[in-house]
Image (spheres, rainbow, N blue to C red):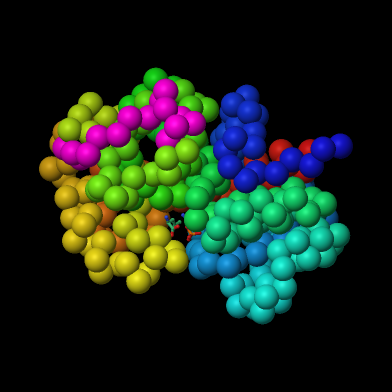
C-alpha cells in the first residue's frame, strides 16, 4: 500500500482533511474517557527536532501515549543528525524501527528528502516553509467556536512565513478568503501565492486588511532561524501589531488566533492575547486532538 505522508496540507484531500478534523473533534469530546481505544497500541512515533518546541513535542508524545502507543524524542543536538549524518541515511534507518516519524527542521527540502527515503509515514512538524499540523488545530478551533470556516474572511497579519504559507494552502483547501498584510519585503513566497491566487489577496495597510474580518491571525515577527534579524524586524513590523485598535476594525465577533509562542508587546498586545476574542489556549490544546486523528489516519 502507498505510504501517506503529511508534508503540507496538500498531502491530503479536502475530504481527508475534514475527516481528520471530525475525528479530532470526536477524540476531544471523549478525551480522558477513551484511553481504552488503544488505536495506536504498540505503535511507535519517532520525533526528530532540529528546532525547539513545546506544543508540538508534548502534543505528539502525549497523544501517542493516550492512544496506547509510544513516542521517542530526538533532540536538536542529541542525535547523529546534529553531527552530519545525511537525512536519507537517517530516514532509512529510523523508518525500519518505528511506525511513523515526525520531523521539525529548517529547509522544506530536508523533509521532502526524508520522506523520499522513509518506509513509514512522515509528518512535517514545522519547516521553514510550512506548519501544516498547526492548521489542523486552527481549523478545528474555528469550527468548534464559530462553525464552518468556508466562506469566512481570515486576515494574516505580519510576516509572510511558514504559518502564512500554510494558511494560504488552507484558504484554497477549505474555501475561505484570506487577506495577507505584511510589511514590504516580507511577503509570502511568490510560488505559494500564485498557487492560491483565487483565495488570497495582499493588502499592505493592516487597518484596511482587517475590515470585516471573521478571524485575525498572527505569529512572531522573527521565526526560529531568524534570531539575528529580531531587533531590526521590531522596527519594520511595528505597524503590524495586533492590538485593540486593529481588532476594532474587524467584525464584533471576530476571533484572534496565534500558533504560539507569542511575544507580548511585539506582534500582539497582552490585551488582545488575554482578551475575550482570543482562542489561543484552546487552539494550542487542539494540537493534541488533531494530531492524534492525523496519526490514526496515516497509520490506517
Ligand atoms: N505552535 C507550535 O508549533 O509551538 P511549538 O514551537 O512550541 O511546538
Ligand atoms: N513561525 C514560527 C512558528 C513557531 C511555531 C517559527 O517558525 O518559529
Q: Residue at x 63, y 24 (%)?
A: 15
Q: Residue at x 60, y 77 (%)?
A: 77
Q: Residue at x 49, y 31 (%)?
A: 195
- Ligand 2 quarter of the rendering: bottom left
Q: What x and y, as percent, mark residue 54?
A: 50, 64
Q: In this view, does 98 lie to the left or right of 13?
A: right
The count of marks equals 0
- State yes or no: residue 276 in magenta: no
Q: What x and y, as percent, mark residue 233?
A: 26, 61
Q: Which residue is drawn at 33% across and 30% down?
A: 201
Residue 174 in view here: yes
Q: Is residue 294 above or below residue 199?
A: below
Which residues lie in the magenta part?
Answer: 193-207
Name the quadrant of the N terminus. Answer: top right
- State yes or no: residue 204 in magenta: yes
Query: Which quadrant of the structure image shows residue 97?
Result: bottom right
Residue 271 in view here: no
Q: Is residue 110 left or right of residue 251?
A: right
Query: Which quadrant of the structure image shows residue 24?
Result: top right
Amino acid at each position: 500500500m502507498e505510504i501517506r505522508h503529511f508534508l503540507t496540507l496538500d498531502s491530503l484531500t479536502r475530504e481527508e482533511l475534514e475527516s481528520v478534523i471530525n475525528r479530532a473533534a470526536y477524540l476531544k469530546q471523549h478525551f480522558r474517557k477513551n484511553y481504552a481505544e488503544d488505536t495506536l497500541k504498540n505503535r511507535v512515533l519517532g520525533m526528530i527536532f532540529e528546532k525547539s518546541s513545546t506544543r508540538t513535542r508534548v502534543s505528539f508524545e502525549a497523544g501517542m501515549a493516550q492512544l496506547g502507543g509510544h513516542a521517542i524524542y530526538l533532540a536538536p543536538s542529541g542525535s547523529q543528525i546534529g553531527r552530519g549524518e545525511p537525512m536519507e541515511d537517517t530516514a532509512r534507518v529510523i523508518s525500519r524501527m518505528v511506525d511513523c516519524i515526525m520531523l521539525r527542521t529548517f529547509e522544506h527540502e530536508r523533509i521532502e528528502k526524508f520522506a523520499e527515503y522513509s518506509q513509514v509515514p512522515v509528518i512535517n512538524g514545522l519547516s521553514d516553509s510550512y506548519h501544516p499540523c498547526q492548521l489542523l488545530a486552527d481549523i478545528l478551533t474555528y469550527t468548534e467556536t464559530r462553525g464552518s470556516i468556508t466562506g469566512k474572511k481570515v486576515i494574516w497579519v505580519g510576516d509572510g512565513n511558514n504559518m502564512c504559507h500554510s494558511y494560504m494552502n488552507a484558504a484554497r483547501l477549505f474555501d475561505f478568503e484570506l487577506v495577507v498584510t505584511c510589511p514590504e519585503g516580507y511577503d509570502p513566497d511568490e510560488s505559494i501565492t500564485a498557487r492560491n491566487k483565487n483565495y488570497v489577496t495582499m493588502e499592505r495597510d493592516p487597518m484596511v486588511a482587517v475590515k470585516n474580518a471573521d478571524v485575525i491571525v498572527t505569529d512572531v515577527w522573527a521565526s526560529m532561524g531568524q534570531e539575528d534579524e529580531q531587533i531590526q524586524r521590531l522596527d519594520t513590523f511595528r505597524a503590524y501589531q495586533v492590538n485593540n485598535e486593529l481588532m476594532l476594525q474587524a467584525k464584533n465577533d471576530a476571533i484572534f488566533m496565534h500558533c504560539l509562542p507569542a511575544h507580548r508587546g511585539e506582534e500582539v498586545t497582552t490585551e488582545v492575547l488575554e482578551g475575550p476574542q482570543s482562542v489561543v489556549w484552546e487552539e494550542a490544546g487542539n494540537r493534541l486532538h488533531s494530531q492524534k486523528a492525523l496519526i490514526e489516519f496515516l497509520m490506517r
